[in-house]
């Protein structure tokens, strides 16, 4: 089992990565809790809930099951989970366990952050994508005007990552998670980037997966420790997300997976970087890898002005100007303000390029 | 102008108390903001909003006006204010000003705490009661199962307390605020307690008011600094609140003011303290003062079991046992677990005593 330690402003917590560690969950909890609420989604519940439940020891163990999918990060479910937690009698010394992907982690984490002004929670990611969201303490729900707009910084008490639970992931979820791993490689670890580009997602070994995830989490952890509240370098983690989030919102959550949208966003950020800094980045190799691994890269007709409006609702927007993460090189991200006019022209060229490619 | 400094875990902030300081608001802000949203209620808006607005300087100044009253601390208004803030284009560098009483402060503070994972806000209390809620960083909305159950610890960047705005308070609000000041006296300052008991709320001088509020805030500030997250002594601030909150919930918000409910709660906590510790506390003098100052002390038929159920939804509840703040003496609070059976008998005796008195 790998262990990483994160020093958050609020407290220190461990990330434990290992094979089949869900069977040891009871010994891996940071302390004993008399009441535990496991929040998960209906798909994860089918596969792993009973195993987790039977390995937990506490006086009172409850479960809340939400529908799988981004739509669950809503005000309505936020309120419903609070009602369930109150009805189950959770108090300030209780624990919430978020068992699932990023949606479960973000929502359950935000409930924990705001239940009686904050109780303990731990993240048990069951997707590759959640290697990113489960570390760093960002918890949130969506607003119809944009993703993750309502939330807190509220780190978990531990992250328990059972790599074995990734073996049942559908292909689209593997693609989704790998887009964030590629992003982390592009920001800070060229070796990770190259290793992924030489991997075939259809025939990943357990070792490849474990190593890629560990590398990704290390990058995420280092950045979060240096800048927990996203005043500076943590913003780099938004590489690919300016367009990615706008695509998810305009197409409707669920049409593209998060990572599939980020895949296109990463290409776009490279495209803009090459134009702004007149440099050459590995756009073509990434494009080919995404295509070979069945990432959807052909988009229906999109309205550039709508995309720009959505990009400006992003949390990184300052004084109505889009702040985009670009690359001066692999491993060298920068923040750049892009005017609406330039953004419009980049978007038009890029979307045309995608269609032609 | 009096200045107190609070050292919160997250940042330091100032409490400024003075006469007519709303006219200096622009110079008292902790920094310059390009976008400001003033959240207030319809009653405060009538009296003070235009003055505050005309003394603020920022590129963009917006207002959101909520209905006055505890009912506004709802999920629905929480969501609505987020929508307004997004529509106005607030970004992470924007400021929210909570202009009003505790309801506005709690709700606007919780919106600030969760808008794009937290933006700056300042408290401008316009009631005596809000001397308590505006200091310490507790922000929250209500759940139908109890008050303040959903919220965060999220301190303001400053508290600007214009004593002059208290001159237009209705009597019931003066009573409401003074109950919390009495509570602070009982917890930590017998002089404040005696000074209030020798004051007549119908003929308070500006100086009396200023001095009582400053003393109350000092006590609150000292306790909050010592125990921001309510792990220990901050719980003492709940003196009178176990029954007080339950009364507010069972009678419906708005039947009693918060402080009127706390007034009864304080009597109850003294009554239980005298029984548990076989001591004599100034129950009678407080009872007489409350009565002379027109606090409602005669309650309609209440169901003891309902009250106990509500008391157990309180955030201080641990493992389903009610944790009550009692007094061993004025200035000497303690936490005591009370069994349901004992609570039931105390409540029955106390309610009978109130009716007979």
Image: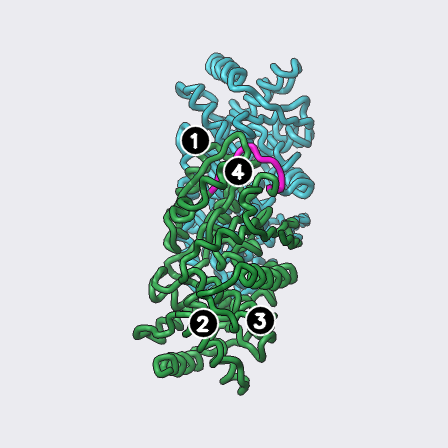
Chain colours: A cyan, B green
**Which is in the foreground here, disc 4 or disc 3?**
4
**Given contact means CB atoms under 8 Å apart, are the residues at marks 2 and 4 in contact?**
no
- Between the residue at mark 2 and the residue at mark 1, the CA separation in whole angstroms equals 50 Å
Identified at 66% across, 50% down, the residue is B12
Report the magenta residues as a range: B29-38
- Residue A25 visible at all: yes
- Between the residue at mark 2 and the residue at mark 4, the CA separation in whole angstroms equals 40 Å
Front position in the image: B331 or A350: B331
Q: Secondary structure at mark 1?
A: helix
Q: Position of residue B291 (x, y in %)?
A: 41, 74
In the displayed structure, would residue B52 be above or below residue A265? below
| Subunit that carries the residue with mark 4 | B
Q: For the residues tagged 2 and 1, is the chain the same?
A: no
- Between the residue at mark 1 and the residue at mark 4, the CA separation in whole angstroms equals 39 Å
User: Crowdedness of circle 3 by 10 Å Cα count: few (<14), some, many (20+)?
Assistant: many
Q: Earlier in the sequence, mark 2 or mark 3?
A: 3
User: Crowdedness of circle 2 by 10 Å Cα count: few (<14), some, many (20+)?
Assistant: many
What residue sits right under mark 3 in the picture? B187
Q: Secondary structure at mark 3?
A: helix
Q: Position of residue B74 (x, y in %)?
A: 39, 51
What residue sits right under mark 4 in the picture? B55
- Between the residue at mark 2 and the residue at mark 3, the CA separation in whole angstroms equals 14 Å
What residue sits right under mark 1 in the picture? A249
**Which is in the foreground here, disc 2 or disc 4?**
4
């Amino acid at each position: 089992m790998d262990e990483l330690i994160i020093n958050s402003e609020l407290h220190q917590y461990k990330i434990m990565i290992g094979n089949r560690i869900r069977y040891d969950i009871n010994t891996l909890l940071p302390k004993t809790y008399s009441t535990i609420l496991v929040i998960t989604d209906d798909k994860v519940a089918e596969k792993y809930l009973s195993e987790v439940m039977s390995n937990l020891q506490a006086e009172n163990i409850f479960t809340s099951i939400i529908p799988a999918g981004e739509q669950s990060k809503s005000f309505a479910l936020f309120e419903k989970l609070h009602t369930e937690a109150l009805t189950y009698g959770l108090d300030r010394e209780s624990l919430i366990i978020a068992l699932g992907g990023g949606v479960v982690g973000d929502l359950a984490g935000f409930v924990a952050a705001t239940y009686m002004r904050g109780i303990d929670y731990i993240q048990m990611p069951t997707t590759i994508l959640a290697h990113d969201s489960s570390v760093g303490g960002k918890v949130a729900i969506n607003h119809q005007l944009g993703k993750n707009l309502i939330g807190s910084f509220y780190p978990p008490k531990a992250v328990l990552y059972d790599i074995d639970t990734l073996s049942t992931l559908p292909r689209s979820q593997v693609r989704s998670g790998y887009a964030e791993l590629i992003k982390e490689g592009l920001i800070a670890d060229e070796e990770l980037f190259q290793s992924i580009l030489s991997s075939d997602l259809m025939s990943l070994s357990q070792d490849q997966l474990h190593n890629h995830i560990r590398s990704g989490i290390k990058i995420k952890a280092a950045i979060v420790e240096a800048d927990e509240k996203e005043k500076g370098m943590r913003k780099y983690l938004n590489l690919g997300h300016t367009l990615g989030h706008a695509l998810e919102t305009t197409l409707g959550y669920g049409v593209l997976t998060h990572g599939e949208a980020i895949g296109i966003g990463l290409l776009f950020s490279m495209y803009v970087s090459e134009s702004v800094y007149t440099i050459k980045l590995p756009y073509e190799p990434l494009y080919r890898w995404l295509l070979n691994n069945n990432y959807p890269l052909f988009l229906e007709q999109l309205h550039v002005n709508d995309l720009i409006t959505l990009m400006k609702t992003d949390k990184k927007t300052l004084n109505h100007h889009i702040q985009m993460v670009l690359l001066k090189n692999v491993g060298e991200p920068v923040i750049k303000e892009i005017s609406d006019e330039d953004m419009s022209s980049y978007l038009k060229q890029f979307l045309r390029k995608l269609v032609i490619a």
